[in-house]
Image (spheres, rainbow, N blue to C red):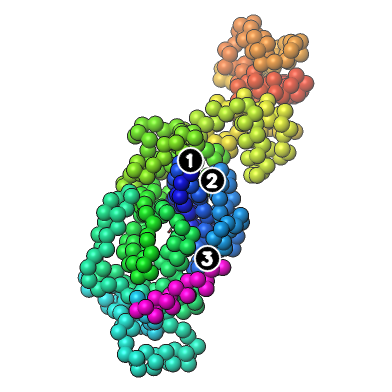
């Protein structure tokens, strides 16, 4: 299927990728995939004060990790390169100048101090814009005077857009339907700053046009800016793209999701051991649904079913329990090979003291059945299997002694287990279990007592994977050594 859908993700490199922005990127990508269109990454780095070094790489790393491959972007180039706004500055100043010439924009000479003063008095009055439009109707003489005063100080004017003072602007948003704004309530916004850099309002719009973007998906916080953009499109005599303003992501207390609720960077979720597909599935459901009940969707199913018509208007709640449940589900669905690879990749990317040396793939494959049923995240695996990587298993001797046991009976259990485990062949979980269950009867103890003692002796952990499988992975010799050491401590 081929179409002219061109959808862009336009991050500002101001820090780590927020899950809300990544949700937008996922929707962009799904829409492009669904319609056989193009997905474009464009870096909006014109706010020099907020730019963070390295942020572009981190954002691209996040997209790659999720599998959101792009057709055009700063690293891969494309027909409309460059894809970084800081490399396209001339284009913006050229258009700003054209708009001044055609009477749709004007130079503003107001100092920051004056603007502050105007804003603080005007904000008290209802229905007033922040700027009083002083420079909108200057006479030729006034303009020249202010121009030279400013030049003498080494400053340059900004360029503002002349919003119509009457009438309304209506956007037909794909999510929200028609939304109407009163023009007189919209500021004569700055398009070009005094340093020659454009604001977002000018730059993104010129780029969306130049890059033939057909659909603009972005957070609902941008909705109030749409009248500015539509008026600017009109002034330039350009056709606007279609807009879809996505619902805000909320914390469970229904306030805007922020750092005080926990992690907000997508890469934190990676570090916490969530799978990329979990994040794609989970974040897609924050604002979109197939049928209000289906939760688990493969990438293919998401692509086949995604549509903006099913994006909701109301805020979507980020529910951590659901995220854990979904991740646990996808971990359990993995093949042994997939999970072994995922664990190895996770441990090598995020080293942890519990796994001092990256295990061989063979050992990773042995670890999989020990942990697969128990994981909510990949990060949960290391504490469970730490005993496999320790030279010395540490515990308090008293921990060996289970309830209603004493040193003597515990020693008896350890000796019997040691002697029995020395003889069975093969040393696999099945025969190990059969032997130990028989032994419970002979020793006249409870299964929990014998197994509890052996768990402490061989893992030093209160919470560990199933005993028989753990012994199998430890192997006969290591198991016997640990049991003998425990016995000698009593
Ligand atoms: N650079 C803007 C942001 O990061 C993009 C908004 C848009 O998609 O138009 O929020």
Rendered residue at 39%/80% (across/down): 101
- Mark 2 element type: loop
Q: Where residue 68 is drawn, which disc sits there?
A: 2
- Mark 3 element type: helix
Name the residue carrying label 3. 85
Instruction: Determine whether 341 is above or below 145 in the image.
Output: above
Residue toward you, 257 or 195:
195
Where residue 482 sits: x, y (%)? 73, 24
Mark nearest the camera among 1 and 2 is: 1
Question: How many residues crowd mark 2 within 10 Å: few (<14), some (14–19), many (20+)?
Answer: some
Instruction: Determine whether 480 is above or below 81 in the image.
Output: above
Q: Which residues are magenta?
A: 84-103
Check if residue 98 falls in the magenta segment: yes
Decide if residue 248 is in sight here. no
In the image, is 154 to the left or to the right of 309? right
Rendered residue at 37%/89% (across/down): 143
Secondary structure, magenta segment, majority class: helix
Name the residue carrying label 1. 1
The CA span between labels 2 and 3 is 21 Å
């Amino acid at each position: 299927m081929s179409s002219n859908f061109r959808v862009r993700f336009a991050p500002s490199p101001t820090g780590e990728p927020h899950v809300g922005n990544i949700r937008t990127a996922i929707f962009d990508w799904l829409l492009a995939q669904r319609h056989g269109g193009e997905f474009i990454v464009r870096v909006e780095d014109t706010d020099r004060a907020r730019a963070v070094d390295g942020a572009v790489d981190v954002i691209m790393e996040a997209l790659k990790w999720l599998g959101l491959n792009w057709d055009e972007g700063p690293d891969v180039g494309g027909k409309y390169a460059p894809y970084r706004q800081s490399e396209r500055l001339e284009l913006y100043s050229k258009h700003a100048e054209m708009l001044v010439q055609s009477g749709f924009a004007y130079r503003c000479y107001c100092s920051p101090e004056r603007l502050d003063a105007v804003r603080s008095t005007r904000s008290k009055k209802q229905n007033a814009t922040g700027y009083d439009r002083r420079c909108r109707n200057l006479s030729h003489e006034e303009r020249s005077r202010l121009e030279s005063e400013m030049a003498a100080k080494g400053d340059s004017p900004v360029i503002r857009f002349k919003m119509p003072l009457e009438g309304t602007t209506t956007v037909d948003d794909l999510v929200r339907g028609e939304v109407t704004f009163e023009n007189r309530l919209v500021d004569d916004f700055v398009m070009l700053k005094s340093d020659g850099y454009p604001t977002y309002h000018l730059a993104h719009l010129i780029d969306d046009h130049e890059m033939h973007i057909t659909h603009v998906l972005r957070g609902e916080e941008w909705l109030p800016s749409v009248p500015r953009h539509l008026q600017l499109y009109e002034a330039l005599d350009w056709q606007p793209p279609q807009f879809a303003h996505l619902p805000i992501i909320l914390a469970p207390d229904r306030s805007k999701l922020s750092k005080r609720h926990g992690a907000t960077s997508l890469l934190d979720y990676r570090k916490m051991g969530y799978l990329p597909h979990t994040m794609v599935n989970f974040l897609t459901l924050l604002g979109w649904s197939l049928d209000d009940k289906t939760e688990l969707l493969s990438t293919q199913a998401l692509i086949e079913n995604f549509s903006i018509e099913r994006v909701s208007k109301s805020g979507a709640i980020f529910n951590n329990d659901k995220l854990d449940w979904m991740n646990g589900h996808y971990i359990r669905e993995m093949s042994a090979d997939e999970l072994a690879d995922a664990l190895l990749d996770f441990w090598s990317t995020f080293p942890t003291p519990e796994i001092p040396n990256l295990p061989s793939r063979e050992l990773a494959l042995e670890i999989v059945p020990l942990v697969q049923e128990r994981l909510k995240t990949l990060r949960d695996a290391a504490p469970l299997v730490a005993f496999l990587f320790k030279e010395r298993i540490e515990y308090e001797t008293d921990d060996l002694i289970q309830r209603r046991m004493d040193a003597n009976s515990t020693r008896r259990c350890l000796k019997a287990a040691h002697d029995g485990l020395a003889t069975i062949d093969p040393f696999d979980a099945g025969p190990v279990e059969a032997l130990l269950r028989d032994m419970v009867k002979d020793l006249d103890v409870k299964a929990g007592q014998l197994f509890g003692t052996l768990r402490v002796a061989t893992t030093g952990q209160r919470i560990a994977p199933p005993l028989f499988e753990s012994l199998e992975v430890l192997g006969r010799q290591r198991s016997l050594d640990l049991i003998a050491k425990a016995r000698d401590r009593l």
